[in-house]
Image (cartoon, rainbow, N blue to C red):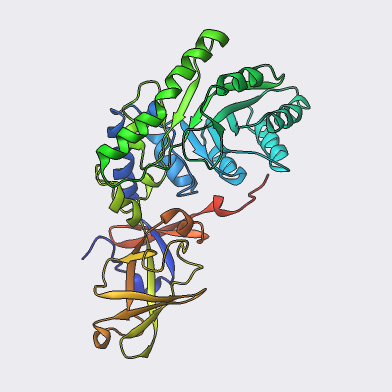
Amino acid sequence: MNWYQLQNEAAIESPNLLVFPDRIQHNINCMLEKVGGDPKRLCPHVKTHKMQEVVHMQLAVGIERFKCATIAELEMTLSAGAKEVLVAYQLVGPNIQRFVQLAQQYPDATIASLVDNLDSANQLATAFEAINRSANVYLDVDNGMHRSGFPLNEDTFLFIQSLDKILFLNFKGLHVYDGQFRSANVEERVTKSHQAFQPVYSLCQQIEGALGIQPIIISGGSPSFSAAAERENVYCSPGTTLFWDYGYSQMVSETPYQWAAILMTRVISKPTEGIITLDLGHKAVGSENPLSKRIHFLNLDNYEAIGHSEEHLVLKVKDWDAIRVGDVFYGVPYHVCPSVALHEEAQVVRANRVVENWSVVARKRKINI
């Protein structure tokens, strides 16, 4: 029997998200190996899995720091027992007050967020002044992705000096995400990541010399993990590595991560010769990629996706006569993160059987706070 196939598949509804703890553990071990076995060098992102149980697995091997993108993810990670969490996002509007509430609810944890402008920094400081505490912040550094962050140039240190003067604000360090480097050639990807990161070292020297602090640096995502792991005094923050997906498996081949989250779907119709329809619509699999790059099936060959809507995925297949309505197919999402977020819970598979389920609790925009 293939590793992904369920012995009790007749009892499992579709579409459904399946997760494999033994494979998650393998991926955690690979992450540890990448940083020389030191769990304290890791600051994994929780955005891929959004599950307390996966946080527990990481805490169990000594990983102490985590990264998240939403207030719900922050609450989930804290409630799972994490003591140091960075919200890798600049907070605006009511999310600032929600952040303050979680800081009050978990006083023994160190939580921080990103800033890239003084208006946002001052709003955060004002909110924390009301509870007589200081807000922990990292400067979001833009070293080439141009999605968010303060540009890495001659003005960056001046901006940090301005941050350091704001009362009720505690500047902790730098967040440097370089998701723009996505070459399948590992040497090219690592080289370009190092080149873009080089000015960060000079910036750190300025900070240490003028402010007397050694900034914490959190750097890299899954594609640039190989580069970040080579740097000293840098915390690495991959996320997709926990579950892995088909897209990154084609791009990042230097580490043997395993697919640990897959989607189960069934044939619901054979409307015309050569065509089958699955119950794997937009609501079950991440659909931001082109139609041909949404899912890779493990037990189906010679197919082409020709249509996708809310509840249906339409395939053109070669072996149409051999396929029956009700047949089960298993597939790896090209992009696992949004695919997981579409499911309220994951079916946990051990020894080819679903034995329990884990709540994808942080898919919510709000848990309690």
Please give left or right for residue 257 compared with residue 94 in the image.
left
Q: Position of residue 145 (x, y in %)?
A: 47, 40
Determine if residue 228 is in view: no
- Residue in the picture at 24% in, 45% down: 256
Q: Is residue 298 visible?
A: yes
Q: Kindly indicate the quadrant of the structure image that contains residue 212.
A: top right
Q: Image quadrant for the N terminus?
A: bottom left
Q: Position of residue 138 (x, y in %)?
A: 56, 28
Q: Nearer the viewer, residue 239 or 120?
A: 120
Q: Position of residue 54 (x, y in %)?
A: 43, 45
Is 213 situated above or below 273? Answer: above
User: Which residue shows up at 34% across the image and 55% down it?
Assistant: 247
Residues 183 and 51: in front is 183
Where residue 302 appears, x then y in whole percent? 24, 75
Q: Residue furthest left?
A: 1
For the view shown, which residue lies furthest in the bottom direction?
272
The quarter in which the C terminus is drawn is: top right
Q: Disc count in the image? A: 0
Work out whether 217 lies above or below 237. above
